[in-house]
Amino acid sequence: MEGILYAVRTGIGWNRLPTALFGASGSTCWRRLTEWHEAGVWQQLNELLLAELRAAGLLDLSAALVDSTHLRALKGGTTPGQPG
């Protein structure tokens, strides 16, 4: 988990993840990230964290930002100004 969070937080390439620091290689961390995503672990973790923050009165969505610019449109999409 630490290796995954480190790679995501820093943007380091999976193949450059220091194995000695986390006890797992970058490829192992990537594989676990993928497996846990497919198993719904990250969704469950996100929902649990949000529920705990909400219950503690610490969730302030007035400062929330949604940004999907890092996601590719795999099936394409329309160009702005182009007829649908």
Image (cartoon, rainbow, N blue to C red):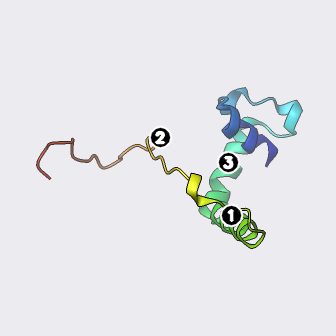
Residue designated by label 3: 31
Snapshot quadrant of residue 35: bottom right
Other-residue count near label 2 (Cα within 10 Å), few / some / many at <14 / 14–19 / ≥20? few
Residue designated by label 1: 41
Q: CA distance from mark 2 to mark 1?
A: 21 Å
Q: CA distance from mark 1 to mark 3?
A: 14 Å
Q: CA distance from mark 2 to mark 3?
A: 20 Å
- Judged from the image, the secondary structure of the residue bearing numbered disc 1 is helix
Residue 73 image point, x, y percent:
35, 46
In the rendered structure, which disc, 1 or 3, sits on the residue that comes first in sequence? Answer: 3
In the rendered structure, which disc, 2 or 3, sits on the residue that comes first in sequence? Answer: 3
In the rendered structure, which disc, 2 or 1, sits on the residue that comes first in sequence? Answer: 1
Residue designated by label 2: 70
Residue 21 image point, x, y percent:
88, 33
> Residue at the location (21% across, 42% down)?
80
- Judged from the image, the secondary structure of the residue bearing numbered disc 2 is loop
